[in-house]
Every structure is written in structure tokens, then in C-alpha cells.
Image (spheres, rainbow, N blue to C red):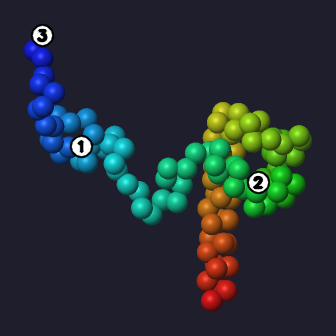
Amino acid sequence: MPSSSPNTPVSPTSPTSPTSPTSPDSPNTSQPRNPLHGLTLEVIVTRLADHYGWAELGERIPIRCFTHDPSVGSSLKFLRKTPWARDKVESLYLFMLRENKRQQQSDF
């Protein structure tokens, strides 16, 4: 078995590097126009609950995890198993970001 020298530098852009910038699976791949990039579902649900409150969140997206004894944990469990509900939550989050941006622009 060949041993590699600890002093041998590995170029980050070399084709054998698993995290080369040209690799589609690279963690360095950025999505600057995607506001959901890098956010966990937990962060999204928490921000929505803080912004709207559970009652209004349950009115905007009428799913049981928001209307009956809501919590971040129960919501995450349901949303991870239910793609259509997760899509609605992500859409509402994007709407909230647009709404906040419009509000900030009108304040100037």
C-alpha cells in the first residue's frame, strides 16, 4: 500500500480533489440567487413561527402540525415526510422575505 507524504500539497482545483470547485457535488458550489440555500427546515419554520405566530401560520397553511398543539419538532417531523406541505412552507417563507424587502424599501 503506497503511503502519501504529509508534506505533499493537494491543489483544491486538481481533478482528483473531491471538493474541486467544478464538481457539482462540491460544498463550494454557491447559489447566490436562492434565498433558501443553506437554510435548514428548522430555521425556516422557526422564522415563520416568530414572524406570523402559530395561529396565523395555521391559517395561512392549514395543516394539523400548525393548528393543534404546534411545535417546531412536530412540524419538522411532518414536513420532512410530506413534500407538498414542505413546498407550501418554503413558498410562504419566500413570500415573507419579499414582503419584508418591500416593507424596508417603502420605509426609505
Instruction: State the residue in front, 19 or 80.
Output: 19
Question: 77 or 85: which is nearer to us?
Answer: 77
> At 74% across and 36% down in the image, what residue appears?
73
Q: Which badge, 3 or 2, comes first in the chain's sequence?
A: 3
Q: Which residue is mark 1?
A: 20
How many residues crowd mark 2 within 10 Å: few (<14), some (14–19), many (20+)?
some
Residue 91 seen from this side: yes
Secondary structure under the numbered disc 3 in the rendered image: loop
Residue with the mark numbered 2 = 49
Q: Residue at x 58, y 45 (%)?
A: 40
Residue 74 lies, in percent from the top left, at 77, 36
Closest to the observer, 10 or 5: 5
Real-space Cα separation, disc 3 to disc 1, in angstroms? 25 Å
Give the x, y percent position of residue 26: 32, 43
Residue shown at the point (67%, 86%) measured from the top left = 107
Residue identified by numbered label 3: 1
Residue 60 visible in the current orientation = no
